[in-house]
Image (cartoon, rainbow, N blue to C red):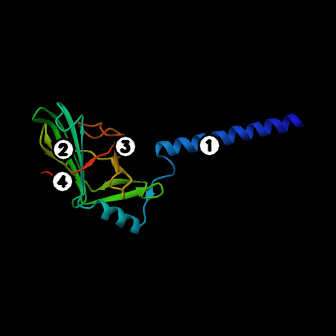
Amino acid sequence: MLRVAFFGLLALIFLLAGAIVVTFAMRISGGAGTLAPVSDPDAQRVRAELADRSFRQFEPDRDGDPRKAVIIEFFDGLGLWAQYAEGDHAVDEWEVRSADYDIESRGDVADEVTLTFVAPESRQQFPDACEGCIDTSGVSISVRNVFDADRIQFRIGDPDGVLPSPFPVFGSWTRFEEDEYFD
């Protein structure tokens, strides 16, 4: 009888330890909870915070050769612009825009939100000009610390690898510099 109780207690300890490890791993990976639409008041707060702002990032830097550049902007909706350049010449350049975007979160919107394009429009400038040719299925932009200008970070999610060059880039949390908008 004592042996059964011992093995029962041991099994319970292993189950509890496993649950703790899984919970901790989910929190580290950002997977704690399921993405769900945010409330209307939270959506309004997020949109108001991001409205008329632009964030840019370069890899390795602005003057790097070659370089990758990404701009996330919130002028009249949501825009994602990307370029791969060698020297002064753009090799690949494209843009995806939508007048509206969905906002989802796994919990507190101040911690992290995920944005997805609604009815996006796209265009490519280089290597060949085209309209509506950029697939955005599954693409998202996650924003961490959305209400803290000093700590705001972005992660571009492209789980199916549909975005063209210069992607994949900035798939992990990255501090984009807030900047004025350039045409």
Residue 86 in the image: above or below residue 23: above
What residue is drawn where x is 29% and y is 59%?
50
- In this view, the residue farthest toward the front is 150
The amino acid pointed to by label 3 is: Trp
- Lower sequence index among marks 1 and 3: 1
Residue at which label 1 appears: 20
Neighbourhood count class around disc 4 (C-alpha, 10 Å): few under 14, some 14–19, many 20 upward: few
Image point (22%, 36%), residue name? 61
How far, Cα to Cα, is label 3 from label 2?
22 Å
How far apart in space, not on screen, are marks 2 and 1 (Cα)?
44 Å
Find residue 163 and report its horizontal and vertical position in percent: 27, 41
Look at the numbered disc 3 and give the secondary structure of its residue: loop
Question: Along the polypeptide, which appears first: circle 3 or circle 2?
Answer: 2
Vertical side of 80 occupied by 44: above or below: below
| Closer to viewer: mark 2 or mark 4 | 4
Residue 46 location, quadrant: bottom left
Instruction: From the image, tell me which residue sits under label 4.
Output: 180
2 or 1: mark nearer the eye: 1
Q: Earlier in the sequence, mark 3 or mark 4?
A: 3
Kindly check if marks 3 and 4 are in contact, taking CB atoms under 8 A apart as contact: no
In terms of sequence position, does the residue under pointer 2 or pointer 4 come before the other? 2
Q: As shown in the figure, which amino acid type bears the numbered disc 4?
A: Glu
Could you give the CA–CA distance between mark 1 and mark 4, rounded to whole angstroms?
45 Å
Image disc number at residue 173: 3
Q: Which residue was labeled with disc 2?
A: 94
Asked where in the image residue 7 lies, by quadrant, the reply is: top right
Q: Position of residue 23 (x, y in %)?
A: 57, 45
